[in-house]
Image (spheres, grey):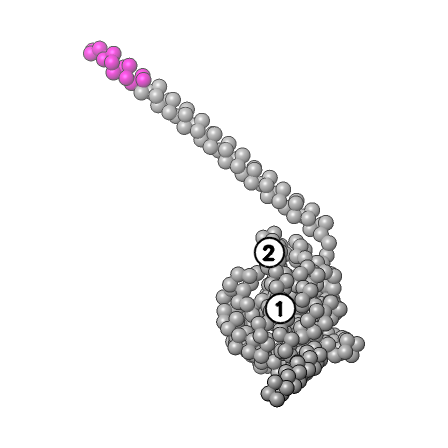
Amino acid sequence: MPMPNIADLVLREMSAQAQEQRTALIARVQRSTWAQRLVACLLVVVCCVYAVLLHLIEMATLTEERSDSASPRTPWSSRRRRQISRWHEYQQQLARVCSQYQPASPYDDRSRLVLLGDSITEAWGGTSYGEPVERAAGAPLVLQQTLAQRWMDPVVLGISGDQTQHLLWRLSHGELSGPMAADPRLLVVLLIGTNNLGAGHAPEDVARGVLAVANAVLNRTRGRVLVNALLPRGDGAHTLARLCPPRCNADGQPYESFTPAIHEVNSLVAAAIGRLARSSSLRARFVDCGSNFVAPEGTESEVVKELMPDRLHPNARGHRIWARCLTDDIIAAGWERNTLATTGTTVLAASHQSRHTSLSRRISE
C-alpha cells in the first residue's frame, strides 16, 4: 500500500482550513451587512416618525389664515417650505419695483395702470414666482399690444397662489409705495380670491377678503380701483374632492363645481362695490369679464379650453380677451384719463403759455 505524500496531506489540510476561514469570514460579513441594513432601516423609520411628529405639532399650533386679515404665506396655506421662501423672495422683488414707481408726466392725464392679484395677474409678466412658465407664454406680448398701448408701462404685481390675506400683507409691506399712494392717476386693476375658494374658504369669507383689499387700496392711496369678478374655473372635479370635509354639500358629499360659489362671491362683491363707489366719490368699480370664458351649455368642460387649457389660468388668447374687456370698461367709466388730477397742471401750463406769448409780442415790438 503506497504511503501518502506528506506534502499533499499538508496542502489538503491548509486548503480545508482556508476554506473554513473563508466561510467564516463570509458569514461574519453577511451578519455585519444585515446588521448595518437593519440599523439603516431603523434610522429611516425614526427619521420618518420624527418628521411626522414635527408636522403634526406644527399643524396643531398653526393659526388659521383669515381671508380679511393680512398674513404672509405660512404652512397653513403653503405645504412646502421652499414655496414660502420663494414667495418672500419674489414679494421683496415686487416691493423694490414699487419703490421705483414714477408717476406719469404732470402734462400727461392718462391713468397709471397697476395690475394686482395672483397667478392670473402674474402671467402678464410670463412668470410664476418670478420664473418663466409655459402656461403664461405670450402673455407679456399681449400686454404690450393691448393695455400698454393706452397706459404706459403697466405695473404687474401678481404672485402665484396668492389669496386675499396674502395680498393684504403685500400691500402693507412695500407694494403700495409712497409715490404710488400719492399719485392721483393711479388705477389699480384687482383680481383676487379664486385661490381662497380653492383652499376651502366659504364664498362670504372670500367676498370679505376681496373687499378688504379694495378698501386697503382706497384708504391708502389717492387712486381708483377696478375690482374684477372671479373668472370661471373648470377644475372642480379634481380640486373639490379634497376639500370635503369641511366644504361638503347638503348630502355630505364634495361639491362637483366651483361655479355656484363663484357666482355667490361675485354677487356679494358687486353689491358691496356699488355701495363702496357711492361712499368713495366713485373711486371703486366692478367689472365682470367671466362670460368670455364660459363654455357653451352641453359641452364637456365648464370653461373654453382654448382660452383656459388647464381650466383655471387663461392663456395668451385668454389674456387678450381679458385686456379687451378691461379696456372697454375703463373707457366706458371715463377712467382712461384723470382730468381732475391734471386740472391744476393744465391751468399752470396755460399760464406759462400766456406769459410766453406776451413776452414774444413785446420782443417783436
Mark 2 vs mark 1, CA separation in Å: 23 Å
Q: Is residue 13 above or below residue 206?
A: above
* Mark 1 secondary-structure assignment: loop
- Tell me the chief SS of the magenta region: helix
Q: Is residue 3 left or right of residue 235?
A: left
Between residue 249 and residue 348, name the one nearer to us: 348
Residue at x-position 58% and y-position 53%? 82
Q: Quadrant of residue 168?
A: bottom right
Q: Position of residue 290 (x, y in %)?
A: 62, 77
- Which residue ends up furthest to the left in the rendered image? 2
Quadrant containing the C terminus in the rendered view = bottom right
Is any atom of residue 140 visible in this view? yes
The disc labelled 2 sits on which kind of residue?
Glu
Circle 2 is placed at which residue position?
89
The magenta segment is 1-14
The disc labelled 1 sits on which kind of residue?
Gln
Q: Quadrant of residue 169?
A: bottom right
Q: Is residue 316 left or right of residue 354?
A: left
Residue at x-position 45% and y-position 26%? 28
Q: Is residue 280 above or below residue 163?
A: below
- Which residue ends up furthest to the front in the rendered image? 365
Front of the two marks 2 and 1: 1
Residue at x-position 69% and y-position 46%? 57
Mark carried by residue 102: 1
* Magenta highlight on residue 351: no
Q: Position of residue 225 (x, y in %)?
A: 69, 74
